[in-house]
Image: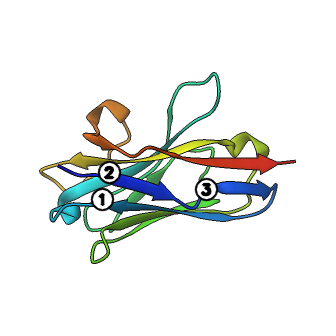
């Protein structure tokens, strides 16, 4: 069982930055692939970024590539999403998720994730 708690969201002007954090409970955090997703009002949840167990590889949605960076600290059971050059279209609730896997892979499909956090709101004003 893994519990995930996101933090770091807020209101920021376009061009600004936020660092989102996701703290995980459980002793096997280092064996979970992690991901960030977001959901804007009236839209489906969409993939943002994912990272492997070890943090050696990551993958991004085209819409955030070059602006967002996912990272993890397995000693602290925490995954991060650094968001830079924010745009109004980045406004959404951001969720982190954990997927138990048997290999060191990135996972981009929401249905393959086993655990989800409650989300943190990011609002970007123009």
Residue beneath the point at 61% across and 50% down: 64
Q: For numbered disc 2, what is the local secondary structure? A: loop
The residue sitting at the bottom extreme is: 75
Disc 2: CA contacts within 10 A as few (<14), some (14-19) or many (>=20)? many
The answer to whether 124 is drawn above or below residue 24 in the figure is: above
Q: For numbered disc 3, what is the local secondary structure? A: loop
The residue sitting at the top extreme is: 42
Residue beneath the point at 30% across and 59% down: 52
Circle 1/circle 3 CB separation < 8 Å:
no
Q: Relative to residue 55, is residue 65 drawn left or right?
A: right
Label of residue 106 in the image: 2
Q: Relative to residue 84, is residue 106 drawn left or right?
A: left
The answer to whether 25 is drawn above or below residue 116 in the figure is: below
Disc 1: CA contacts within 10 A as few (<14), some (14-19) or many (>=20)? many
Q: Nearer the viewer, residue 101 or 94?
A: 94
Circle 2/circle 1 CB separation < 8 Å:
yes
Q: For numbered disc 1, what is the local secondary structure? A: loop
Coloring applied to the structure:
rainbow
Between the residue at mark 1 and the residue at mark 3, the CA separation in whole angstroms equals 23 Å
Label of residue 9 in the image: 3
Label of residue 52 in the image: 1
Q: Which of disc 3 and disc 1 is earlier in sequence?
A: 3
Percent position of residue 114, x then y: 25, 40
Q: Nearer the viewer, residue 122 or 106?
A: 122
């Amino acid at each position: 069982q893994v519990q995930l708690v996101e933090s770091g969201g807020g209101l920021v002007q376009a061009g600004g930055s936020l660092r989102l954090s996701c703290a995980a409970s459980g002793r096997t955090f280092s064996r979970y692939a992690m991901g960030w997703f977001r959901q804007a009002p009236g839209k489906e949840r969409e993939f943002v970024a994912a990272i492997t167990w070890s943090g050696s590889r990551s993958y991004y949605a085209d819409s955030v590539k070059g602006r967002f960076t996912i990272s993890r600290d397995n000693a602290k059971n925490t995954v991060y999403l650094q968001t830079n050059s924010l745009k109004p279209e980045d406004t959404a609730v951001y969720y982190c998720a954990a997927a138990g896997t048997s290999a060191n892979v990135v996972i981009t499909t929401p249905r393959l994730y086993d655990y989800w956090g409650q989300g943190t709101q990011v609002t970007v004003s123009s």
